[in-house]
Amino acid sequence: MLFNSIDFAIFLPIVFFLYWFVTNKNLTLQNLLIVVSSYVFYGWWDWRFLSLIIFSTIVDYTIGVKLKDEENQTKRKTLLWISILVNLGFLGIFKYYDFFLENFTNAFSFFGVEINANSLNIILPVGISFYTFQTLSYTIDVYNRKLKPTKDFIAFSAFVSFFPQLVAGPIERATNLLPQFYRKLTFDYTKAVDGVRQILWGLFKKIVIADNCAEFANQIFNNSADMNGSTLVLGAIFFTFQIYGDFSGYSDIAIGTSRLFGFNLKQNFAFPYFSRDIAEFWRRWHISLSTWFRDYIYIPLGGSRVSTWGKVRNTLIIFMVSGFWHGANWTFIAWGLLNALYILPLVFLQKNRKHSGLIVQGKFIPSFKDAVSILLTFSLTVFAWIFFRAENIGHAFQIISEILSYSLFEIPEYTGIGLVIPTTILTIIFVLIEWFGREGQYAIAQLGMQWPAPLRYAMYYAIIFVIFWFGGKEQQFIYFQF
């Protein structure tokens, strides 16, 4: 079920009504409603893959219970590895089997040995990378005794399948989200209104910015052989805003929807395109995934407490894994390695923590130095997104070679160039709103709070009008494929 669909517009009020007015007297019933609603939400796409979520839930719940009373370290490790292998096994089969098979056969073909192997050609279950990592965080935290295992199967099932963030995050930690299913929640009008406001901004990001930018990005990338360098740069910029509006828009809707039910999810995007270096960008982009890799891979490898070359190794590993998490394609691995190369100089110079606070706090406009840093970091990010969007490595290099040619200085040659103007204007307005709202959890969190009520509501209605009037052709959320 898509957030930007009529189905969800009907589904959400029904669940909201049942949660607060029918099951509100009983916590177990409320959690059971969340589980059933989440299964309906996910099964709306393909009910057959519900079995994966249910099986993963049962396995990790059972292992958590067994870890509670098990003191033998060897047996504890065995239980942990069962959880890891089951969850990553599903991920490997559905997401990476064909990739490894293809590269395995190609490697032997290179040496003149032909191997006949059949690919599975199976559909990738939506959100499998997200809920797999979420359940793994529970098992690992229980194993490390950072979290007491739950004996409430319904609450645990609600944690695993919580529909607002089930298919595209944020990837919530059990230490944050699971305890919220243990306590009776009361309706908070202020929190609910803030949730609706965040949903509105998320819909604007997705429907107005991402979907409009997607039309031009897709046309340019899909016909890149016929485009000059300047047009390809335009396509890369459109994709840059497409993926941000798409994914951060989803996160805003997920977080806002959760607040309607009294739940608090962690911020997943913190205005990453205003970052002053790549290290800061990765602290602000897809925060739930970046911190997951930091806590469960980078730190166990030694983190930054190792030698300089150890830091290089750990950085390369973490970005390669991040790239591979995004998809079974060499383009994602190249994208991850490129970001690693961006960040390594900062690691060597010990400046990767230089920018950890708010962006240009309290200033209307950035200083010249900050503006240059932001522009440079944004440019590097745009360049890296070319690999992310390209069909394959060859396609990426074909685009880059044309961008680096003299055609970069030509006027963009695009048949629908006139149609680009409204989207460009809307994107500029969007960037300005994000800039002025960068100190909040999301751009319009505080915008207009000091205005008279009629003016503030006029702004909200204006956003709704723009969504309906300028909304682009409906596009599937990009991160559904991950």
Image (cartoon, rainbow, N blue to C red):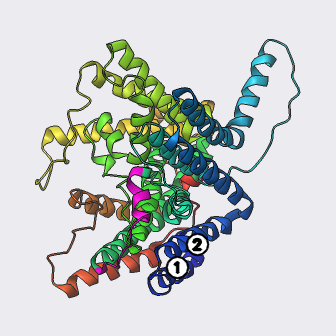
Q: Which of 77/336 is in front? A: 77
Number of the label disc, if any, that sits on residue 15? 1
- Work out which quarter of the rendered image holds the N terminus and state it: bottom right
Q: Residue at x 51, y 68 (%)?
A: 472
Q: Position of residue 324 (x, y in %)?
A: 56, 34
SS at badge 1: helix
SS at badge 2: helix
Q: Would you call the spot at circle 1 few (<14 residues within 10 Å), some (14-19), or many (20 or more)?
A: some
Q: Which of 66/22 is in front? A: 66
What residue type is disc 2 on? Ser
> Mark 2 or mark 1, which has the lower sequence index?
1
Q: Residue at x 44, y 51 (%)?
A: 174
Q: Position of residue 181 (x, y in %)?
A: 44, 64
Number of the label disc, if any, that sits on residue 37? 2
Q: Position of residue 134 (x, y in %)?
A: 51, 49
Is residue 416 located in the magenta-colored stretch of the structure? Answer: no
Q: Residue at x 56, y 78 (%)?
A: 11
Question: Magenta stretch?
Answer: 175-189
Q: Is residue 150 left or right of residue 110?
A: left
Is residue 184 located in the magenta-colored stretch of the structure? Answer: yes
